[in-house]
Amino acid sequence: MDNQETLFTKIINREVPAKIIYEDDLCIAFRDINPQAPLHALLVPKQVLPKLSDSSQQEQSLLGHLMLTTALIAEQQGYADAFRVVVNNGEDAGQTVFHLHIHIIAGRELSWPPG
Ligand code: 5GP
């Protein structure tokens, strides 16, 4: 599963351009091409995991790292106090790219329920 080619691995490999705002050994974050708020970033693990529900105990530390990095990115972008974190899991939940990613959304009033 690790070497599966996805749109996001192409961004990781610089084969598709993106506005990258963060990168470390395990993950990368870039601006969503169709932003829903002033900050709309996608945080993506370099390891390909199609969706959150495909993860297991083996991914525990990676998933923890992604959560901590989400908060770090929100802070770095100036939105430490209010941001929304979304993971669409599965087609019926709105997932369109099958490479796990966390949406980090901030910079406007965010209503609830999200719809
Ligand atoms: P999903 O619907 O799978 O949760 O989220 C996929 C996200 O990827 C969408 O918000 C969509 O706008 C974004 N996206 C799709 N293609 C590209 C692309 O080529 N570049 C960037 N930066 N974002 C993309």
Image: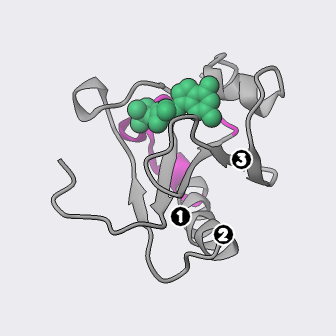
Q: Is residue 48 visible?
A: no
Q: Mark 1 points at which residue?
A: 67
Left or right of 74? Residue 35 is: left
Choose mark 2 or mark 1, whichever is in front. Answer: 2
Q: Does the magenta stretch include residue 47?
A: yes
**Residue 11 found in image quarter:** top right
Q: Mark number for residue 77?
A: 2
Badge 3 element: strand
Q: Quick one: which residue is furthest to the top in this view?
A: 5
Q: Is residue 87 visible?
A: yes
Which comes before the other along the chain, label 3 or label 2? 3
Badge 2 element: loop
Q: Quick one: which residue is furthest to the bottom in this view?
A: 81
x, y percent for residue 92: 22, 27
x, y percent for residue 105: 46, 58
Q: Mark number for residue 28?
A: 3
CA neighbours of label 2 inside 10 A, class few (<14), some (14 to 19), many (20+): few
- Magenta segment: 46-61
CA neighbours of label 1 inside 10 A, class few (<14), some (14 to 19), many (20+): some
Left or right of 12? Residue 81 is: left
